[in-house]
Image (cartoon, rainbow, N blue to C red):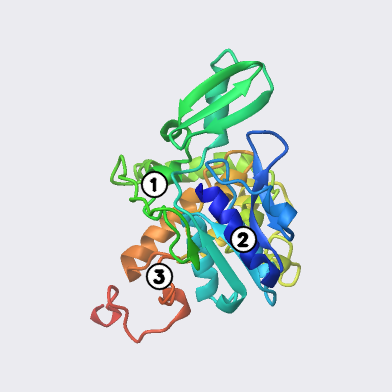
Amino acid sequence: MSRLEELKTRIKEALPGLECVIAWQKGYDPLHNTPLFIRSEADVDKLEWGPLNVHNPAVYLPSFKGKKVGIVVKGCDSRSVVELLQENLIDRSEVVIFGLPCEGVIDLSKVKARLAGSDAAAGTVTDVTTDGKTVSVTAGGKTVSMPLTEVRADKCGRCQFPNAVLADTFLGDPISPTEPAAPVDADLAALDAMSVPERMAFWRYHMERCIRCYACRNACPMCVCRDHCIAQSREPHWLTQEDTATEKLMFQVVHAMHLAGRCTECGECQRACPMDIPILALKKHLNRTIHDLFGYQAGTDPQAIPPLLQFKVEEDNIKERDW
């Protein structure tokens, strides 16, 4: 029995006691899988597993608080579930977690770039298949095969948690973490190499392109105060609706600060951005600072307390009494 079939069997067994199970299904074309809310055995047959499951389903869990639900997770998704549990935004007794090992998810922009330089460029995508190592896309009657390692999301090239950090049911054999090709993230290294004025110019350029759609916020599983977000709040009135780089950068900086020590680097903010703004770099920069100061990595230890949710008289790595 394949992992997918075994997963379907386990979900069918658990479904009578659950409001629903959150997973993925085929979307509006073969390249896009979309979230699936399984409420019946018929829905189970729609379930998909593979590199097209790019969404992080943990984003939906807070809206189900008070109801018992199941969720299918990749390693990065499970970190978001752990962080939500640590912050008491969801209840452990209300969540049944199904985990599988993940070999990586595709970056659609990379796939489209590969198609653009092929005979299939002008065709409509009619089929996508994968064997775990190769992604084959058929468009316009032409099939283009590409190694998964070349079209997977950047986060997958450095993933240290390919297996669910926390799971009630884990299917398949755990796989080893990715060996990073470089010791540091390329986007952070590029920003570190810039002078302060260059960095400001970099972000101003990208903020000029921002359309204030808030897809980055809406896709983030840890951004849970949307009804009181500074982007819409008028009491207090933090931001205007002016279409200026200053206002947009203000939102992005506050958004990043609200995620300090909480961001699991699932990359949903950047993936959802229609303007391809490298907004994840802001969160990763703060994550690096939190790791250096507190030795903490979000969503990796269900028993840990996030450093900004606890108080110590003196932090181990800060030693403010020595100042």
Instruction: State the residue in front, 197 or 36.
Output: 36
Nearer to us: label 3 or label 2:
2
Q: Is residue 124 above or below residue 215?
A: above
Q: CA distance from mark 2 to mark 1?
A: 40 Å
* Callout 1 touching callout 3 (CB < 8 Å): no
On screen, residue 315 above or below 70: below
Q: Outermost residue, bottom direction? A: 313
| Residue type (three-letter) at the residue carrying disc 3 | Asp
Q: Position of residue 134 (x, y in %)?
A: 46, 30
In this image, 150 relative to 233: left or right?
left
Q: Relative to 100, does residue 156 appear above or below in the rendering?
A: above
Q: Nearer the viewer, residue 323 or 148?
A: 148
Q: Earlier in the sequence, mark 1 or mark 3?
A: 1
Picture residue at 54% right of the left edge, 25% below the top: 113
Estimate the x, y position of residue 114 in percent, counting from the top left: 52, 23
Asked if residue 307 can be seen in this view, the reply is yes
- For mark 3, what is the residue? 301
Q: Secondary structure at mark 2?
A: helix
Residue 11: image tag: 2
At 58% from the left and 39% from the top, the residue drawn is 276
* Residue 267 visible somewhere in the drawing: no
The label number, if any, that marks residue 35 in the structure image: none
Residue at the location (70% across, 34% down)? 29
Amino acid type at circle 2 is: Ile
* Badge 1 element: helix
Mark pair 3, 2: CA separation: 26 Å
Residue denoted by label 1: 188
Q: In the displayed structure, does residue 30 sit left or right of residue 74?
A: right
**Residue located at (48% from left, 54% from top):** 100
Between the C-alphas of marks 1 and 3, the distance is 25 Å
Count of numbered circles on the image: 3
**Please, what secondary structure does the residue beneath circle 3 have?**
loop
